[in-house]
Amino acid sequence: ARGQGHTFVHSNGIIFLTQHARNELVSKYPCIVQLHQSVIPHGIDPIFSHERTNDLKYSIPIKLLYVSTVDLYKHQWNVVSSVSNLRKEGFDVQLTLVGSAYPQALDKLKATIEKVDTNKSFIKYEGLIDYVDLPSLYQQSDLFIFASTCENLPIILLEAMASHLPIACSSRKPMQEILSDAGVYFDPENTTSITNALRELLLSSELRKVKAKMAKERSNQYTWGRCADDTFEFLSACI
């Protein structure tokens, strides 16, 4: 931490990916307030941009998707338990989990899947897949879930937004800064909260349509062109 602070203090300027990141670092290193600063988020790869034309009517079974590294702060097991709850309520839902995994977190995930879906009939863990195959996976899904408790700028969330998906999302910072009011939020450490958010989206096609449209529109501000322009402008100001 001392080395990081030393680097900040001796910099001409600092670029943050989110306002949340800026706030966290300024609170820890108040001296950096005097430096040139700018919040410049990354962009979204255009391959994820997709316009849905089916009025967001979901398929049967309803395809839920969570793309993210399986790690302790990603809470995939809570999502699995919530999907199991929805199945018990009569919702014909199927969850696909995609991402590499850390051993401890993967063990926890597999144990939860084994507990709630012994026959592996509605929970699929695909592991890591090729990046170029991700866009079609988003497009084939009906609803996206993001349950992380610790992020700076979650590119995966941006990808889901660009894919025109309704999103049930963690309420932890900085997710609301990115998604704003274009998602339905939940406490990622509370299975009941996740279940309630998913149920709310599943019960209303109009809500899914509105939230997906808002997310898609909001994703348009995250472009690499804008990122490059803002970065060069910032560098010029620091010289």
Image (tube, grey):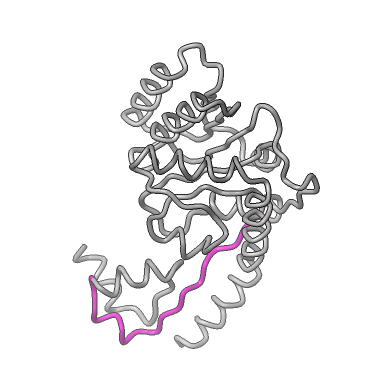
Q: Nearer the viewer, residue 192 or 71?
A: 192
Q: Nearer the viewer, residue 76 or 238?
A: 76
Q: Give the position of the N terminus as an image quadrant.
A: bottom left
Q: Position of residue 174 (x, y in %)?
A: 42, 61
Q: Residue furthest top?
A: 119
Q: Nearer the viewer, residue 172 or 54?
A: 54
Span colored in magenta: 28-45
Residue 196 shown left or right of residue 102 in the figure = right
Q: Position of residue 64 (x, y in %)?
A: 58, 35
Whether residue 20 appears in magenta in the rendering, the answer is no
- Report which quarter residue 96 is drawn in: top right
Q: In the image, what residue occupies the spot 69% across and 28% down? A: 60
Whether residue 38 appears in magenta in the rendering, the answer is yes
Residue 182 shown left or right of residue 141 in the figure = left
- Report which quarter residue 110 is drawn in: top left
Q: Nearer the viewer, residue 59 or 29?
A: 59
Q: Is residue 85 above or below residue 28?
A: above
Q: Position of residue 186 (x, y in %)?
A: 42, 49
Q: Residue furthest right?
A: 53
Q: In the image, what residue occupies the spot 57% across and 43% down? A: 144
Counting every numbered tag in the picture gives 0
Q: In the image, what residue occupies the spot 49% across and 88% down? A: 237
Residue 35 shown left or right of residue 225 in the figure = left
Q: In the image, what residue occupies the spot 45% across and 78% down? A: 38
Q: Is residue 188 above or below residue 176?
A: above
